[in-house]
Amino acid sequence: ETGVTQSPTHLIKTRGQQVTLRCSSQSGHNTVSWYQQALGQGPQFIFQYYREEENGRGNFPPRFSGLQFPNYSSELNVNALELDDSALYLCASSLWERQVDSYNEQFFGPGTRLTVL
Amino acid sequence: AQKITQTQPGMFVQEKEAVTLDCTYDTSDPSYGLFWYKQPSSGEMIFLIYQGSYDQQNATEGRYSLNFQKARKSANLVISASQLGDSAMYFCAIRRYSGATNKLIFGTGTLLAVQP
């Protein structure tokens, strides 16, 4: 069973630039969630993708956008980077089955550490 | 709205001793799930234990147990027989029990240091 992977592991950008982070979900999972974890804080939910559509979003501006592909991998795109976007970005995958509709454990990747200068 | 409060920024424990990490929560949802995650310095969030709001018994997973007191809205994590490898950040989190949106609300975490 392949776990959740993320790329790149580290990234340095300057203010105003755009960035794309990538996530490969665990085998058999159909849902991907993205979280932002600022230094010294707990992760904050950005959004979730289920079957290639966004189906939940946290309190983040529209310059945070995403995609999910048919193989359930996902991208997080951030436009017009700001200094406060410096953080660890975590991707988590899970399996949601509509007919079961119970809690579904999320498996997290190792994260991408983004630094905005 | 849901909220998690972890009041212990840092904790020390001697190796082989037990330690309790505190977590209180606030939610208006009738059913919900509570989670504990471990985050080593590598950054990955490692799932430890889950408690559903309607579960009658406290959850246990090996050396981890969850002291769930629903009336007090607390979900403390107990680690028995601490090991050096337990040194890490520990996060408590809550989510709605069901539904497609798997949104976890995390607390600010507790840094646990296990001393030899």
Image: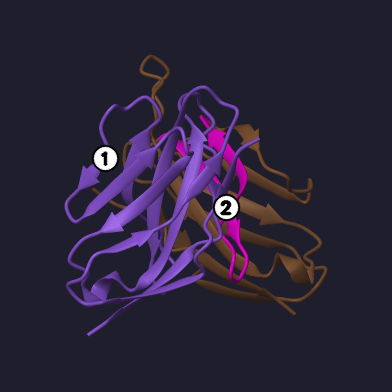
Judged from the image, the secondary structure of the residue bearing numbered disc 2 is strand
Q: Is residue A107 visible?
A: no
Q: Residues within 10 Å of mark 2 (few under 14, many from 20)?
A: many
Q: Which amino acid does label 2 sit on?
A: Tyr
The foreground one among A100 and A75 is: A100
The C terminus of chain A is located in which quarter? bottom right
Q: Do the residues labelled 2 and 1 touch (CB within 8 Å)?
A: no
Q: Where is residue A3 in the image (x, y as percent from the top left)?
A: 32, 53
Q: In the orientation shown, which residue stands out farthest toward the top?
A: A99
Q: Work out whether disc 2 and disc 1 sit on a shared chain.
A: no
Residue interval drawn in magenta: A30-51
The foreground one among A44 and A93 is: A44
**Magenta segment includes A31:** yes
Per the model, the C-alpha gap separating discs 2 and 1 is 26 Å
Q: Residue A35 carries which label?
A: 2
- Magenta-highlighted stretch: main secondary structure? strand
Mark 1 belongs to which subunit? B
Judged from the image, the secondary structure of the residue bearing numbered disc 1 is loop
Q: Which chain is brown?
A: A
**Magenta segment includes A13:** no
Give the residue at x 16% y 52%: B62
Q: Chain B is drawn in which colour?
A: purple
Q: Name the residue under label 1.
A: B59
